[in-house]
Amino acid sequence: MRSCRTPSEAYRGFTLVELVISLVIVAVAGVTLVTVMAKETTGTVPVEERARAVEAARSLIEEVLVCAFEDPEGPPGSFGSEEADRTAFDDLDDFDGWVDRVPLGGPAPAGASAWLERRVEVCNVSPDDLEIEAPPGSSDFKRVKVTVPTSSGPVLLLALRGNR
């Protein structure tokens, strides 16, 4: 014999409780997805800024290293900038203490500048220990340090140049 169903049993759908639970699950998943995506997109700006800072430091250190070890027109062992204009810098130590700013070239992180500042330090170093500074003109080695501050910490490049 065939059983008869009542119309309410034949067309049964979701209950209100099942609907609320499914909406909560979808909402939690949506919030989690948006949070993860927001962290990913904000994390790329400091990486790009740092990459640009490395490139800015690298290009400056290359420019410094092609200069003569000592002033070609000065007495041997002289140290310090003899030039007022950067275009006239002709030896390594002319760059000592020099600071300039270059455009960031992309979106700046929140609260950061759209410019990168580059600082140069040049010093004579001991041939026995390249970490120890030597008096000007007393060594055949100079250490060049270029620092570029960024929102995620400074970029620092070091180079060593000999007089031979």
Image (spheres, rainbow, N blue to C red):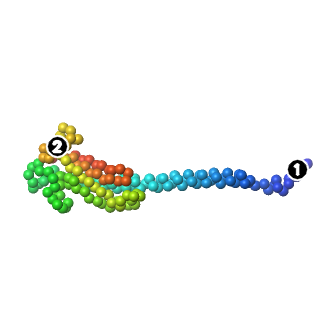
- Residue 38 place in picture, x, y as percent: 50, 55
Disc marking residue 3: 1
Residue at x-position 61% and y-position 54%? 27
- Residue 135 place in picture, x, y as percent: 15, 44
Q: Secondary structure at mark 1?
A: loop
- Residue 67 place in picture, x, y as percent: 18, 54
Q: Is residue 148 left or right of residue 21?
A: left
Residue at x-position 45% and y-position 55%? 42
- Residue 96 place in picture, x, y as percent: 20, 53
Residue at x-position 13% and y-position 44%? 138
Q: Amino acid at mark 1?
A: Ser
Identity of the residue furthest to the front in this view = 111
* Label 1 neighbour load within 10 Å: few <14, some 14-19, many 20+: few
Location of residue 8 (image quadrant): bottom right
Disc marking residue 100: none
Residue at x-position 44% and y-position 53%? 43
Q: Is residue 73 left or right of residue 95?
A: left
Nearer to me, 81 or 139: 81
Q: Secondary structure at mark 2?
A: loop
Q: Amino acid at mark 2?
A: Ala
Identity of the residue furthest to the right in this view = 1
Foreground tag (2 vs 1): 2
Residues at marks 2 and 1, CA–CA distance in whole angstroms:
103 Å
Q: Which residue is mark 2?
A: 134
Can residue 148 be seen at all in this image of the molecule? yes
* Label 2 neighbour load within 10 Å: few <14, some 14-19, many 20+: some
Label located before the other in sequence (2 or 1): 1
